[in-house]
Image: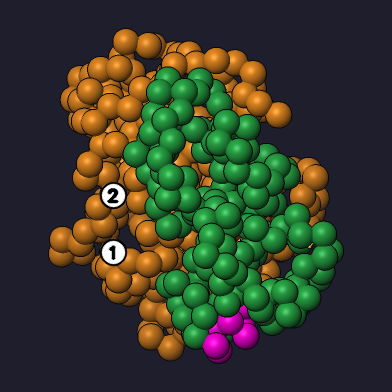
Chain colours: A green, B orange
Amino acid sequence: MEFTVKVNGERWDIDAAPADVLLDVLREKIGVKSPKIGCERGDCGSCTILLDGKTVRSCLVLAVEVDGQEITTVEGIGYEGLSQLQDLFISNNAFQCGFCAPAIVLSATELLDSNPNPTRHDVQEALAGNLCRCTGYEPIIEAVLAAAEGGAK
Amino acid sequence: MVIAKEFDYQRPTTLEEATQILAGHPGSARVLAGGTDLVAWLRDDAVAPDLVVDIKAIPDLHDIKIDGDTLHLGSLVTFSDLINSPIVSEHAPLLAEMAETVASTGIRNRATLVGNICSAVPSCDAGPVLLGYDTTVHMIGPDGTRSIDINDWFVGLRETACAGDEIVSHLTMKVPVHGGVYVKLMRYAGEDLAQAAVGIVAYPGDEYRVAFGAVAPTPIRSTRIEDALRSKPLDEKLIAEVVAMVADEISPIDDIRATAAYRTRICEVMLERGLPAARERLDGTGPAYGTRLI
Ligand code: FES
Ligand code: FES
């Protein structure tokens, strides 16, 4: 089946089978590798993308479903240099292996877009379900709170 | 891991067209809304349809409307929509309290309330809450529209009263003055299914609705507990009396997430804490919606 989707501002005409999952099409056909293959059942969050501005788990979306929609991944967010949020993740040493990082950047971006002054609880809620095996989450939460204070996007 | 079995995909733009497509594929088509259950099941080979009918291009199914004390929720309303809706927070904040316990933001942005009751797994979060209201499920099929009471909706494990050629268009719920709680035990926030859950709605005149999740093949209402509570002041003695009834009302199993004994005990605790909270919320004094009771 043929469909069209915008990925990080660029239009793609894709030919995929209905059974092809969006995560695989993004990685293999479009070449966007920041959404990671983790649990493939919606639990870990590592495949998170922004679909029309909202986080979704691309392992639970069929590629053909996104016909006409717009996808942003971390490649799109950092296109013109790192966002303030990304800078703060770095200065807080928020990640180690980085496997969870693209998804957490997107989830925190979504949070700050809708709620520029989140409480610690808001941040924890927004990031819940984005599993990180390395950090214990504290530096991640601190970085998002610091970004909020700095009026970051 | 890919989805092993190929299938066709159609995206109708009206409910009528969708039901015609379903009628042409008896027993072999599945309706796709948010997909958070369906895509996982396709991958697991738990379902293997020949055709997937995506209803997301059908307009009007996103509506959240209030008419008098009747709340209308379209079948594409997501859990995030419930959390963000001013109508829901004014007329039935219990729906938002429940929605906030569902998995993660990334799931809630996609998963629909109606899809949740159509999947009809025992831990379905919407079940114990919708059973607390006079809720009607409205469907459309080849022979026209049909409505069914939520009490007749859950037929068995992953089984509902909705026929294969029918599609749910919306729910209507009576939301007169009430106070409610949804208490859910899960191992951690962010992804876990309910190990056990209790939904309670208190109405004026000492009327209560009590329902449990994840402790039977379907979400279940306990009319025996409701009868025992009716028209009596909610004091410690009455609460102890109904808490003692819980073990007979539910039929939990041992599984990877909890033992039956633990599920029973925690249901007792959740009822014990939930009843006064629902009552106080009715009176306008209870803990804010969203406050976790366990
Ligand atoms: S890979 Fe999608 S949530 Fe884990
Ligand atoms: S930094 Fe390794 S998983 Fe989060």
| Amino acid on which disc 1 is placed | Val
Q: How many marks?
A: 2
Q: Nearer the viewer, residue A84 or B217?
A: A84
In the image, what residue occupies the spot 50% across and 85% down?
A151
Identify the residue at image location x=30%, y=17%: B21
N-terminal label among 1 and 2: 2
Front of the two marks 1 and 2: 2
Q: Which residue is mark 2?
A: B62
Side of A131 where B283 appears, left or right: left
User: For residue B192, what is the image quadrant?
Assistant: bottom right
Q: From the image, which quarter does the N terminus of chain B lie in? A: top right
Q: Is residue B117 above or below residue B84?
A: above
Q: Is residue B279 above or below residue B259?
A: below
**Could you say which is closer to the camera, residue B121 or residue A84?**
A84
In the image shown, does B11 or B127 lie closer to the viewer?
Answer: B11
Q: Nearer the viewer, residue B235 or A64?
A: A64
Answer whether residue B252 is visible to the viewer in this image: yes
Question: Mark 1: which secondary structure?
Answer: loop
User: Mark 1 falls within which chain?
Assistant: B
The magenta stretch spans which residues?
Answer: A144-150
Quarter of the image where the C terminus of chain B is located: bottom right
Q: Residue at x 28, y 27 (%)?
A: B12
In the current view of this chain or complex, which residue is farthest to the front?
Answer: A80
Q: Position of residue B43 (x, y in %)?
A: 63, 28
Return the x and y of residue A65 as percentages of the image width and height. 42, 34
Label 2: how many Cα within 10 Å (few below 14, some 14–19, many 20+): some
- Prevailing secondary structure of the magenta residues: helix
Relative side of A131 to B103, left or right: right
Q: Residue B80's x, y, as percent?
A: 43, 59
Q: Amino acid at mark 2?
A: His
The residue shown at (77%, 67%) is A95
Which residue position holds label 1?
A: B175
